[in-house]
Amino acid sequence: MKKILSFLKGSNRYKYLIGGILIGLLSMHAWTAIYSTMTTASCLELKDKLKGYYWDWIDWLLMVGGGGIAAIFWLLM
């Protein structure tokens, strides 16, 4: 459990997960939750890439994973 928490605290990765969940919940449907989080994560990583940083796939996957959590919530509702 400590490894997971330290991984999420590194480089503020928990913010990507929480942001993905919030965007997915605001989408009001399971498929739009996935689509909107994928679009948002790609835009954030593109912004970083254009500023000269590297494309971080871990941040991208955490945000889309948060959207997946929200999509599961919408499928169960």
Image (cartoon, rainbow, N blue to C red):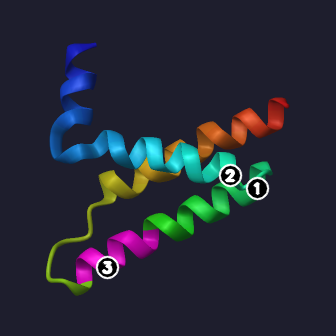
| Front of the two marks 2 and 1 | 2
The answer to which image quadrant residue 36 occupies is bottom right
* Residue 14 x, y percent position in the rendering: 33, 39
Q: Which residue is located at x 80 percent, y 51 percent?
A: 29
Task: Compare residues 7 and 26 and report the one nearer the observer.
Answer: 26
Residue corresponding to mark 3? 47
Q: Residue furthest right?
A: 77
Q: Do callouts 2 and 3 mark residues in contact (Cβ within 8 Å)?
A: no
Residue beneath label 1, please? 31
In screen coordinates, is 20 left or right of 34?
left
Which stretch appears magenta?
Answer: 42-49
Of pointers 2 and 1, the one earlier in the residue sequence? 2
Left/right of residue 32 with respect to residue 70 in the rendered view: right
Circle 2 packing at 10 Å, graded few (<14), some (14-19), many (20+), is few
Residue behind mark 2: 26
Q: Residue 75 — which label? A: none
Above or below: residue 32 compared with residue 47: above
User: Compared to 8, does 63 lie above or below?
Assistant: below
Name the quarter where the C terminus is drawn. Answer: top right
Q: Nearer the viewer, residue 54 or 73?
A: 73
State how far apart marks 2 and 1 are (Cα).
Answer: 12 Å
Q: Position of residue 72 (x, y in %)?
A: 71, 35
Q: Amino acid at mark 3?
A: Lys
Three-letter residue code for mark 1: Trp
Q: What residue sits 27% from the left and 24% below the top?
A: 4
